[in-house]
Image: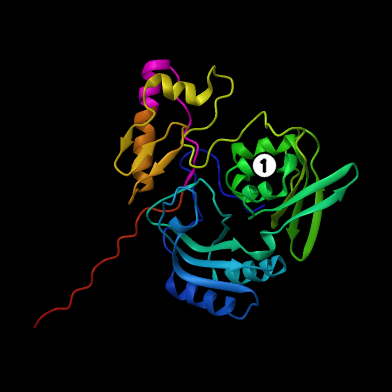
Amino acid sequence: MHTPEREGVEAEGPPGAEVDDDKLAELLRALAELPGVRCRRGEPLARHNALRVGGPADLWCVVDDPATLPAVWAAASKAGVPSSIDYPLSDRLIKAGGIGGLVIRPGHSFEQVSVVEGEDGPRLELGACAPFARAAGLGGTWGALGTWPGTPGSWLGGPRWALLADFADAIVIQRGKTVSVLPWADGEPPPEPGPRGVLRAVRLRAPLSLRLHRPPPPAGALFAPMPKVPGGINGLLRGAGVLGSRLRAWRLEANGAVSQHGGGAAEDLLLFAKAIRARVHAVHGLEPEPYPPLVGRNPIRRAVRTKKVS
C-alpha cells in the first residue's frame, strides 16, 4: 500500500533530492492525455496538510478515478519519476524543499460518504479523503465521529489508525481496476492489501454511545499519546509548564496541539519540539515522542548564472 512513511521523526520522502526537469515535462505530457487527471507544477504542499507547512511538490496530480491510478503510476515509472500518495489533512511535517517527483492526491471518488447495509446493521463507508467531520451530519451515534480530525487516509500507518479497530468492519481497497472489501477483525490490525493497493474507504460500525472512550490526538498534535502515563501527554506538558509557550511562529496550545502564527517552517517546529522534550525530561524524567513524521527534502539551492562582461 502507498502510505506516508511513519518510521521515526526523520522519515524519508520519495527518493531523490531533485528530479530532472525533462523527465517531469515528459510525465506531464503523458498525464495530460489521461481522463480525470489534473496536474500542476510546483504546488505548495503547505496548502494541503493540517500543519500548513512545507515546500512544493515537483508535480502535483489530482486523480479523480481510482481506475486511472495504474496508468498514472505506469507513466511515472516510464518517465523515471518517483511517485507517492498524499491524503488530505495529514499531520506530517514537510521540509522547506518540498517533495521530489510526482505527488498524487486521490480525488472525487475517494471523498464519498455513504451508509451501506452490513450483516448485523448499517455501516458508515467513509472515503479515504473524506473528513471525519462529515459524519456529524448523519446524527445519532455517527455524529460522535464528527469530532475526529483529519481523514481515514491521513491516519493510515500512524498511531491514530489503531483507534479505528474499535469500530472498523472492513477497508475498501483499489488495486488496479479492481475494488476489494477486506474484513477487519475486531481489535486486530487492518488487513494487508498488498502492493499497489490504495485505501479507497473504511467501513465503520456505529459507536455504542455518543462518547468515544479513546479520543484521537487533536489536529496538529505535537507529541504522540502516552496512555500508560498518569494524566497522559497533556498531564506531562501541563506539569512541565510548557503549555502556551511559543517559538517564532509556533505556539503550543492547551490541548497539546501546535498552531502557526504565520510563516512557520518545519525546521522551526522541530527545534521547538526538541526544547519541549528537554523541559519535560528535566521535570518528569520522560521524553515524549514527536508525533508528526518529517518528510521531504532540504531546500534546493540552485547556482546563480552570471554573464561575463567583456
Relative depth, front residue between 166 and 143: 143
Query: Picture quarter containing residue 200?
Result: bottom right
Three-letter code for the amino acid on which mark 1 is drawn: Leu
Residue 56 horizontal/vertical position (percent) = 42, 61
Which residues fall within the magenta stretch? 277-294
Q: Is residue 269 above or below residue 105?
A: above
| The stretch drawn in magenta includes residue 43 | no
Relative depth, front residue between 233 and 86: 233
Residue 204 horizontal/vertical position (percent) = 76, 44
* Figure quadrant of the C terminus: bottom left
Query: Picture quarter containing residue 304?
Result: bottom left
Relative depth, front residue between 175 and 146: 146
Res. 258 visible in picture: yes
> Going by the picture, which residue comes out furthest to the left?
310
- Residue at horizontal 54 percent and vertical 74 percent from the top: 27
Q: How many marks?
A: 1
Residue 189 horizontal/vertical position (percent) = 73, 37
- Residue at horizontal 58 percent and vertical 23 percent from the top: 227
Residue 290 horizontal/vertical position (percent) = 47, 34
Q: Secondary structure at mark 1?
A: helix
Q: Is residue 230 above or below residue 91?
A: above
Q: Which residue corresponds to mark 1?
A: 145
| The stretch drawn in magenta includes residue 287 | yes
Res. 193 visible in picture: no
Relative depth, front residue between 54 and 88: 88
- Residue at horizontal 74 percent and vertical 46 percent from the top: 192
- Residue at horizontal 34 percent and vertical 30 percent from the top: 275
Query: Picture quarter containing residue 55?
Result: bottom left
Q: Is residue 214 above or below residue 182?
A: above
